[in-house]
Image (cartoon, grey):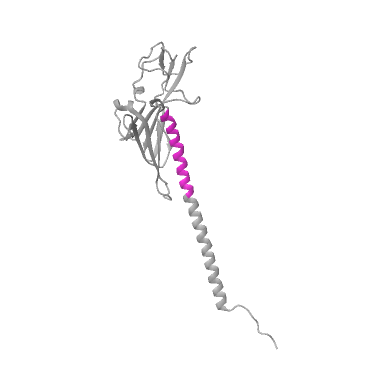
Amino acid sequence: MRKPCRGFGLVEIMVALVLGLVVTLGIIQIFAASRGTYVTQNSSARMQEDARFLLSKLMQEIRMTGMYGCLSLDNVTVVSGSITKPAALTTPILWDDATKKLTLISADISTAGSSPTWTVVTDCQTSTQIYTVKPTPATGFTAFPLRQLTYTLDGTNLMFKAGTGSDAAQAILSNVDALEVSFGMGGSYPMSYTGTVTTAASENIRSVRLKLTLKDPDNRVRSQTYSVVAALRNRF
């Protein structure tokens, strides 16, 4: 007597197919979620890195604003090839909120690249000269190179220019949603911050607060705001 053939029935096959489909969909969903998380974290990390780069650069330059050497520039000695004190040196830090333009006169700590905007040459005792070139100081004199730096928010691009020449500003950072600058003023405790400072009151600036808001061009993460405070070294 032959034994009956055994196999899978139609119901069993359909149940197996449904279970397999459920497992496959679950794996696909997990993979899609993992990929979405990776993309989001990568976008957020890139925004943080861009903000860290720009704010660290600005903090370094703000700390060195007004560092004009070891003597006051109120009594400059004019000799052959030197100039009188430029008016721009009176206000080493300026912020125009209407045009979103930040101008700094900062000590040039680099030793390479283009020439400084001005050079202060002094013996740190009685004599100080200002040049528009980079002269070789005589024996007993020290040179302090100065550079005018301009940052302007143009749409979503932060533009940068060094010096006062005719060279066009270059984009240093993209996808900038907002840039805010406020000043910590001396004479009050705790220190108060204001977004508007007159030329006469610029001498009382003790620190600068920067707020930078970046956005993701692909809208994968929300706009992020980063804030730092930089103290002016020669004001404390």
- Rendering quarter of residue 99: top left
Please tell me whether residue 128 belongs to the stretch shown in magenta: no
Q: Quadrant of the N terminus?
A: bottom right
In the image, residue 163 sits, relative to residue 28, either above or below, namely: above
Residue 98 at what x, y percent from top left? 30, 35
Q: Position of residue 181 (x, y in %)?
A: 35, 35
Foreground pick, 92 / 202: 202
Answer with the quarter of the image where residue 202 lies: top left
Helix, strand or loop: magenta stretch:
helix
Name the residue located 48 percent from the left edge and 49 percent from the top edge: 41
Is residue 90 visible in the rendered structure shown here?
yes
Question: Where are the magenta residues, as a range?
Answer: 41-63
Percent x, y of residue 22: 52, 67
In the image: residue 3, left or right of residue 172: right
216 lies left or right of 5: left
Q: Position of residue 26 (x, y in %)?
A: 52, 63
Q: Is residue 164 visible?
A: no
Quarter where residue 208 is shown: top left
| The one of 143 and 160 positioned closer to us in this rendering | 143
